Amino acid sequence: MPRLLITVLRVGIAASIMLGLFGQIVVIPTAAADEVDRFPAYAPFAAPYVAVAITGVACVQVVLAAMWMLLDMVERDVIFTERAFRWVDIIIGAAIVATLLAFGVTSHLGVAEIPSPDDGMEVTSALGAAAVCVAVGAAFAMLMVIMRGLLRKATALRAEMAEVV
């Protein structure tokens, strides 16, 4: 892989991690506080939902850090080793945790009696967004399981080729 592309990808990963950190520290708590100020009945839901949102962003950051390590392995041409599986497993685990968090939010929004300032569209929209997050998270986790299987086959083929040569 060209060195320039690896550098660009690393800059993108670092920027994404920093943007996520900004979101965790500033955006998520501020948005929750603004919603509670706008509609005080949301107050009991603010802290749990903020915690879930911050944890969800942390899961994305873990995936990005694992991608950084895999990118480093690609750069050193050691991606087809057993060590790569640890990082892929971390990505799968973080995706599953984030998906379970989104499923919990979806379940809560579906059954809880959450007051709404208008006609309830805020809660319905949040429910729809959470359901989409569950679907995307599950699809990503399944894709990574498939990619792990492909990595396993490629690693075995590379080891077999090394024995032949």
Image: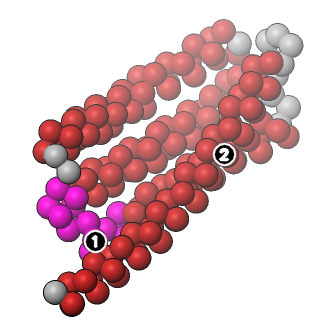
Instruction: Residue 139: say if magenta.
Output: no
Decide: marks 2, 1 in contact (CB < 8 A)?
no
* Lateral position of residue 37 relative to residue 27, left or right: right
Choose between 149 and 136: the one closer to the eye: 149
Q: Residue at x 52, y 65 (%)?
A: 145
| Position in image of residue 127 (x %, y %) | 75, 33
Residue 134: mark in rendering? 2
* Residue 92 visible in the current orientation: no
| Position in image of residue 23 (x %, y %) | 42, 27
Choose between 126 and 1: the one closer to the eye: 1
Is 103 drawn above or below residue 27 in the view shown? below
Q: Main secondary structure of the magenta part?
A: helix
Which residue is disc 1 drawn over? 80
Instruction: Residue 78: say if magenta.
Output: yes
> On the rendered image, what quadrant is the C terminus found in?
bottom left
Is 155 drawn above or below residue 143 in the view shown? below
| Position in image of residue 111 (x %, y %) | 85, 40
Q: Residue at x 35, y 63 (%)?
A: 87
